[in-house]
């Protein structure tokens, strides 16, 4: 039975998760209003508004003791003060109190189950929306935004938004409901007392207005300082080997210490401001409690009808609840301010239009591999100088083209345009005759593979890294990729062979081993377009020989682009494009360019000279 219950609950939860909406539009609307949370809550709850209405109906039922017991207590006291006490009536009052208390258990469980489910689903929806947006944002955006700041926004700010929603649903809305009921009861019994009760509202509004600006500013400063610290920490961890290799640990500690102190100072300023706010709100609350008591006593002394001993106790109890409700709203203000700041932070991501939008664009089925650049110019955002100028190149399907040139000549920029990471500023790039700007990039990229200069591996086994993202593959395909990328050569030395864990970023492997795994990952996909960006740069001479043979066999029948500094590795290319300052300096076969004795010839001689000096050393 227990297993069936758990299974049923799990199924219900999964069904709820599958209905998670995309809140991108909600956050973008928030960003357009300054990212202050306006409309965000209503936008988040809209898909589940009816569930929440039912939940709050049960909230009213479950909290009946808060309203019933003071009324009946007042009635019991007045009954005891009467000339003749009706014991049966007192017993009935007691039975009603008991029933109102006992019904709280089942009704609270219904309320909690609905509210918790909705909040968990909203929390998942916010996180899912941010992840979707981060995946849709362009490579340019990710290269300009520090990864540490993005991590802080995702981990810290989504959690703050979650707490913000919980404050709204567990504190703000229930408190407003309770406040309305208590005021309604007071109005029914004595409009004069209700009017006195309402005096607390403008006083508290003034108090909130006084502290709104300082608290919001403190949380804004704290959020920015936390993001900067997160970015610095990420950078420190990435540089740890360089830091330790040069004995710079103390320098890094000093840098981080200053940022930690800055976060601490911002946190203390925020805490002190909130503490002052809390102290003043508490004093105001207690002051009004005392004033309420003396006001009711004064009305009783004056002989105003309805101000019996029981009524005074009832009004005091109702006022305590109303005061508590108002204080709960006020005390939730700092949490709300923190949540709104988190919404503003997430809105910075959600409002970015630097995205790869493939909606309505053409899918490429059966890619041939024709690639044509037509008078292409490219410059990076906010830069005036073009890094690619008047670039025209027509590559036929199955052709192998190598790119050479000094660092900064534009080779990698051209590769990034072929992948679709960058789009021409001027001119056009055509894939199988279609402008790449009109192509569904995600679909297009499924037909190509890239081996970057710096191999990118994740924590997991060698097999998982090679087959990353593949839903279907045969063992023969895996074995073939391993063989051709020369991965097999070092598998025998690992404790678990292909199932050995590579460590974080492949830290348990050598540079050459990591690069060969990256090559195997590309080859197993059998791409129509293959891009090798310095694919052999991290290999020793023996490994380079085997991988070069593997590359030569793998490029047959597919369009291949090779970026290389080792010019000896591109002899077999159909064409070599020599780049200089973003332009094509010369193009031809290896033999043609050597005979030309131009830019490529100079690079080749310089490469040979450097190789000879290295061997001498």
Image (cartoon, grey):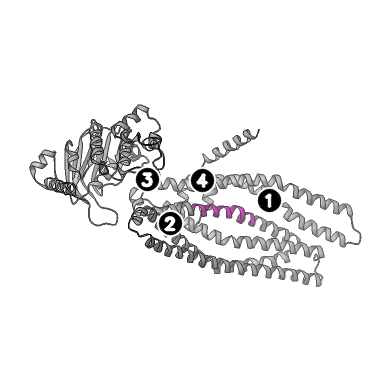
Which mark is drawn over residue 230?
A: 2
User: Which residue bears the numbered disc 4?
Assistant: 124
Q: Can residue 369 be seen at all in this image of the molecule?
A: no
- Single out the mark in the foreground, 1 or 3: 3
Q: In the rendered view, would you say 492 is above or below 267?
A: above
Provide the residue span drawn in magenta: 158-176
The residues bearing labels 4 and 1 have C-alpha atoms spaced at a distance of 27 Å
Quarter of the image holding residue 226?
bottom left
Q: Secondary structure at mark 2?
A: helix
At a point 38% along the width and 55% down the height, the residue shown is: 235
Q: Closer to the camera, 245 or 131? A: 245
User: Which residue bears the numbered disc 3?
Assistant: 507
Quarter of the image holding residue 153?
bottom left
- Single out the mark in the foreground, 4 or 3: 3
Mark closer to the chain start, 1 or 3: 1
Q: Closer to the camera, 616 or 598? A: 616
């Amino acid at each position: 039975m227990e297993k069936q219950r758990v299974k049923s609950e799990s199924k219900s939860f999964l069904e709820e998760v599958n209905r998670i909406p995309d809140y991108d539009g909600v956050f973008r609307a928030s960003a357009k209003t300054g990212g202050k949370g306006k409309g965000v809550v209503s936008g988040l709850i809209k898909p589940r508004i009816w569930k929440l209405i039912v939940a709050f109906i049960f909230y009213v039922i479950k909290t009946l003791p808060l309203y019933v017991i003071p009324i009946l207590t007042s009635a019991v006291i007045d009954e005891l003060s009467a000339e003749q006490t009706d014991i049966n009536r007192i017993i009935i009052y007691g039975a009603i109190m008991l029933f109102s208390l006992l019904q709280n258990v089942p009704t609270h469980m219904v309320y909690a189950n609905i509210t918790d489910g909705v909040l968990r689903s909203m929390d998942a929806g916010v996180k899912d929306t941010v992840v979707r947006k981060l995946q849709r944002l362009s490579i340019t955006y990710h290269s300009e935004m520090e990864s540490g700041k993005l991590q802080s926004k995702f981990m810290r700010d989504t959690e703050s938004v979650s707490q913000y929603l919980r404050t709204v649903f567990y504190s703000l809305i229930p408190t407003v409901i309770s406040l309305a009921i208590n005021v309604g009861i007071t109005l029914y019994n004595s409009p004069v007392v209700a009017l006195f009760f309402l005096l607390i509202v403008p006083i508290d509004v003034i108090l909130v207005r006084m502290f709104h600006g300082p608290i919001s500013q403190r949380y804004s400063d704290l959020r920015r300082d936390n993001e900067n610290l997160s970015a610095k920490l990420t950078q420190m961890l990435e540089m740890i080997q360089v830091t330790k290799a040069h004995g710079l640990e103390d320098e890094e500690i000093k840098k981080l210490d200053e940022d930690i102190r800055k976060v601490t100072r911002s946190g203390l300023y925020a805490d002190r401001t909130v503490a002052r706010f809390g102290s003043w709100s508490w004093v105001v609350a207690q002051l009004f409690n005392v004033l309420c008591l003396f006001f009711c006593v004064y009305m009783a002394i004056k002989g105003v009808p309805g101000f019996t001993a029981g009524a005074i106790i009832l009004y005091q109890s109702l006022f305590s609840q109303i005061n508590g409700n108002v204080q709960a709203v006020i005390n939730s203000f700092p949490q709300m301010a923190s949540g709104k700041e988190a919404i503003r932070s997430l809105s910075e991501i959600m409002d970015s239009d630097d995205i790869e939008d493939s909606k309505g664009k053409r899918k490429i089925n059966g890619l041939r591999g024709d690639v044509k650049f037509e008078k292409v110019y490219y410059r990076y955002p906010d830069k005036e100088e073009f890094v690619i100028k008047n670039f025209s190149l027509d590559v036929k399907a199955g052709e192998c083209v190598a790119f050479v040139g000094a660092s900064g000549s534009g080779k990698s920029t051209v590769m990034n345009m072929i992948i679709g990471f960058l789009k021409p500023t001027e001119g056009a790039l055509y894939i199988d005759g279609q402008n790449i700007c009109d192509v569904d990039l995600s679909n297009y990229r499924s037909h190509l593979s890239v081996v970057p200069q710096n191999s990118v591996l994740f924590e997991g086994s060698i097999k998982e890294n090679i087959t990353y993202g593949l839903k279907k593959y045969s063992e023969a395909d895996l074995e073939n990729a391993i063989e051709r990328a020369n991965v097999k050569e070092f598998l025998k030395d690992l404790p678990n062979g292909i199932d050995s864990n590579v460590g974080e970023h492949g830290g348990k492997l050598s540079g050459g081993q990591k690069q060969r795994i990256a090559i195997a990952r590309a080859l197993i996909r059998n791409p129509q377009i293959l891009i090798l960006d310095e694919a052999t740069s991290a290999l020793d001479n023996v490994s380079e020989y085997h991988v070069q043979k593997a590359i030569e066999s793998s490029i047959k029948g597919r369009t291949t682009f090779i970026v290389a500094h080792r010019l000896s590795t591109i002899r077999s290319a159909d064409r070599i494009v020599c780049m200089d300052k973003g332009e094509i300096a010369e193009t031809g076969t290896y033999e043609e360019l050597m005979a030309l004795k131009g830019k490529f010839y100079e690079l080749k001689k310089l490469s040979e000279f450097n190789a000879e000096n290295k061997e001498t050393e």
